Image (cartoon, grey):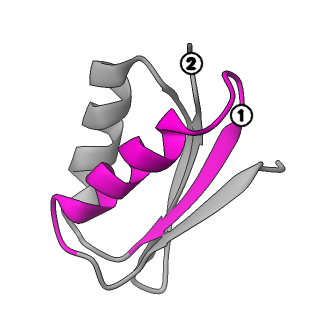
């Protein structure tokens, strides 16, 4: 899958990854896809919850080598 923008939240702790994702998504067009990279273990819970609360679509979530990768489609 392709994405429109990328957010590197590696090294940031809760709640910063979600706050930065929210800010980035606000500037993106409806339907655009954000790739977010994180390594905070809390992001596994926080990002899906954020997507549900804000109405965005979590397209995928995967963990590899202690890093998390999320693909989020902005809903408008």
The residue shown at (35%, 77%) is: 39
The residue shown at (83%, 50%) is: 2
Residue 55 located left or right of residue 25: left
The residue shown at (27%, 77%) is: 12
Considering only vertical position in the picture, is 6 above or below 32?
below
Q: Gap in Å between the C-alphas at discs 1 and 2? A: 8 Å
Dot 1 falls on a residue whose secondary structure is loop
Q: Which residues are magenta?
A: 13-38
Question: In the orientation shown, which residue stands out farthest toward the right?
Answer: 2
The residue shown at (51%, 39%) is: 25
Q: Earlier in the sequence, mark 1 or mark 2?
A: 1
Quadrant (top left/top right/bottom left/bottom right) for the C terminus:
top right
Residue 30 sits inside the magenta stretch: yes
Instruction: Locate residue 48: give its quadrant.
Output: top left
Q: Position of residue 17 (x, y in %)?
A: 31, 61
Dot 2 falls on a residue whose secondary structure is loop
Q: Which residue is mark 2?
A: 75
Q: Which residue is mark 1?
A: 32
């Amino acid at each position: 899958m392709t994405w429109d923008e990328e957010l590197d939240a590696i090294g940031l702790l809760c709640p910063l990854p979600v706050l930065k994702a929210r800010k980035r998504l606000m500037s993106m067009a409806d339907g655009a896809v954000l790739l977010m990279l994180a390594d905070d273990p809390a992001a596994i819970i926080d990002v899906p919850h954020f997507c549900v609360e804000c109405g965005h679509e979590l397209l995928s979530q995967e963990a590899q080598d202690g890093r998390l990768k999320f693909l989020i489609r902005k809903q408008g």
